[in-house]
Image (cartoon, grey):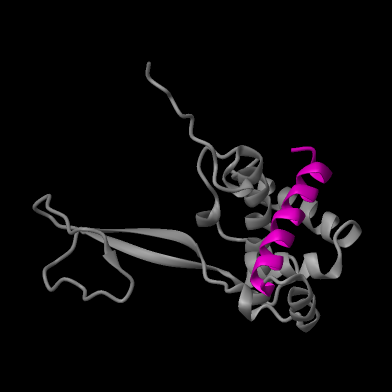
Amino acid sequence: MIAIQAWTPKNWWETEQGGSVRGYFEAYGAVVKERETTGDPSAIPSGDWVVIGGGRSSPSNISDIVLAYTEVKRFLDRNATRRQAALVNFVYVEGMDYTTKAKYLFSDGSETEWLPEGHEVPLVPVKDIVTQATRIYVYDFDRFDSPELEEVAKCWGTSKKALLKREHDRVGRIFANFAGL
């Protein structure tokens, strides 16, 4: 007899619902970051942020990004606690960054491997340059400013990081119910 074990997600964010919520939160973070960067209160991210063929969890056009931003903003203003709103901003605005890779195409049809940011440019003539930007998260819950959580963590015999991870999951689930995902 062969036992088949189905794949189960490690955490809620790896589920379909968690992925949908992450898409909304990433759209919100991209809009806020764009507005902070440009100083324009009505700015929206450029087209390279958009996911081709996206759905509710990954916006496929600029209007989808604005709708996702608006939905998250409405949720944060009406339903989230201050800490939850700060946590969403910490992870999806301050903690989201991009890494860029480039590939060089030459006249003879050959090409380079994907080269990381800051690489040396080839010395031979280049026919075309293909770039690829990937979103990455660079946040550390230990750096989230909330001294009151450190006291709570001590009382409960856990870490501030563990409490913030639970709060991050909780705000995702609450948003999923709010948005009907």
- Left or right: where does residue 25 sit relative to residue 133? right
Q: Where's residue 161, x and y in %?
A: 64, 71
Mark count? 0
Q: Is residue 126 magenta?
A: no
**Where 71 sits versus 137, above or below?**
above
Would you say the magenta stretch is mainly helix, strand or loop?
Answer: helix
- Left or right: where does residue 105 sit relative to residue 90? left
- Depth check: give the residue in front, 5 or 89: 5
Residue drawn where x is 21% and y is 73% of the image = 121
**Where 70 sits versus 119, above or below?**
above
Q: Is residue 170 magenta?
A: yes
- Depth check: give the residue in front, 153 or 59: 153
Give the image quarter of residue 134.
Answer: bottom left
- Depth check: give the residue in front, 62 or 162: 162
Q: Where's residue 138, x and y in %?
A: 52, 71
Q: Residue furthest left?
A: 108
Residue drawn where x is 74% and y is 78% of the image = 154
Image quarter of the N terminus: top left
Residue drawn where x is 85% and y is 60% of the image = 80
Q: Where's residue 20, x and y in %?
A: 65, 43
Q: Is residue 62 visible?
A: no
Image quarter of the C terminus: top right
Q: Which residues are magenta?
A: 159-181
Give the image quarter of residue 160.
Answer: bottom right
